[in-house]
């Protein structure tokens, strides 16, 4: 399920505990984010393509594909920020998560305000001009309109949803 967000930031939570997933969806929805929850590691990549999130919250202990493997797979195909969100607080787990491409690591018992602050920081970093390697604010011609600051693409006035990698390729070509 999805919760609409006025700010348009989309968060994919990959969380095997349905109760935690429901709580995340409610909390993130109240904070103004659109959130989808996937409870199985094997479905996570499909969710990444289908939902096209701006950020992924990823549990490490999932049925199907484990979170560490998913983190590495996501990083191999996308620049979307990945925040590990898990009960595990061992240093070796944290180091492995960062080595596999995680942008941040949050232990589940952290205060909600801290989680929201880390999400906001991850989104901010991903939306900086350096992240897209583009300093212009907009490209427009008779057919194509690319708003670099908002990560929006329109073709003949209709919005086109792109993955972060597709967006980066398009900005390179433009």
Image (cartoon, helix red, strand yellow):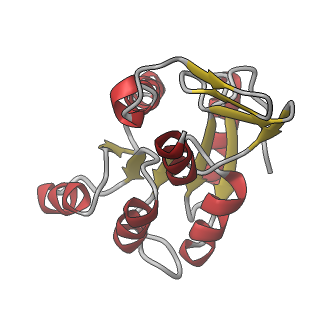
For image coordinates 40% across by 24% down, the residue present is: 128
What residue is drawn where x is 53% and y is 78%?
63
Q: Quadrant of the C terminus?
A: top right
- Judge left or right: residue 84 versus residue 165: left
Residue 118: x %, y % from top left: 39, 29
- Residue found at x 54% / y 73%: 41
Residue 111 screen position, x and y as percent: 41, 28
Pick the residue in front: 39 or 36: 36
Residue 93 x, y percent position in the rendering: 21, 62
Q: Is residue 18 visible?
A: no
Q: Position of residue 80 (x, y in %)?
A: 46, 47
In the figure, 48 relative to 134: above or below? below
Vertically, is 63 above or below 97? below
| Residue 50 visible in rendering | yes
Judging depth in this view, the residue of 139 and 81 nearest the camera is 139
Q: Residue furthest front?
A: 142
Q: Residue furthest bottom?
A: 64
Using residue 54 as the reference point, say whether residue 72 is left or right of it. left
For the residue pair 125 and 139, the one nearer the viewer reads as 139
- Count of marks overlaid on the render: 0
Q: Residue at x 41, y 70 (%)?
A: 73
Which of these two is toward me, 74 or 86? Answer: 74
């Amino acid at each position: 399920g999805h919760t609409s967000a006025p700010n348009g930031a989309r968060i994919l939570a990959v969380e095997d505990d349905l109760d935690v997933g429901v709580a995340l969806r409610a909390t993130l929805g109240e904070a103004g984010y659109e959130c989808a929850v996937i409870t199985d590691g094997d479905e996570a990549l499909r969710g990444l393509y289908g939902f096209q999130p701006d950020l992924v919250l990823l549990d490490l202990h999932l049925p199907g594909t484990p979170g560490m493997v998913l983190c590495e797979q996501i990083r191999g195909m996308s620049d979307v920020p990945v925040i590990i969100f898990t009960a595990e607080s061992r240093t070796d787990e944290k180091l492995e998560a960062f080595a596999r491409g995680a942008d941040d690591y949050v232990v589940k018992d952290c205060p909600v305000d801290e989680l929201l602050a880390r999400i906001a920081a991850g989104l901010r970093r991903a939306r900086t001009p350096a992240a897209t390697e583009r300093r212009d604010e907009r490209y427009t011609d008779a057919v194509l309109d690319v708003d670099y600051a908002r990560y929006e693409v329109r073709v003949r006035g209709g919005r086109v949803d792109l993955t972060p990698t597709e967006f980066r390729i398009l900005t390179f070509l433009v």
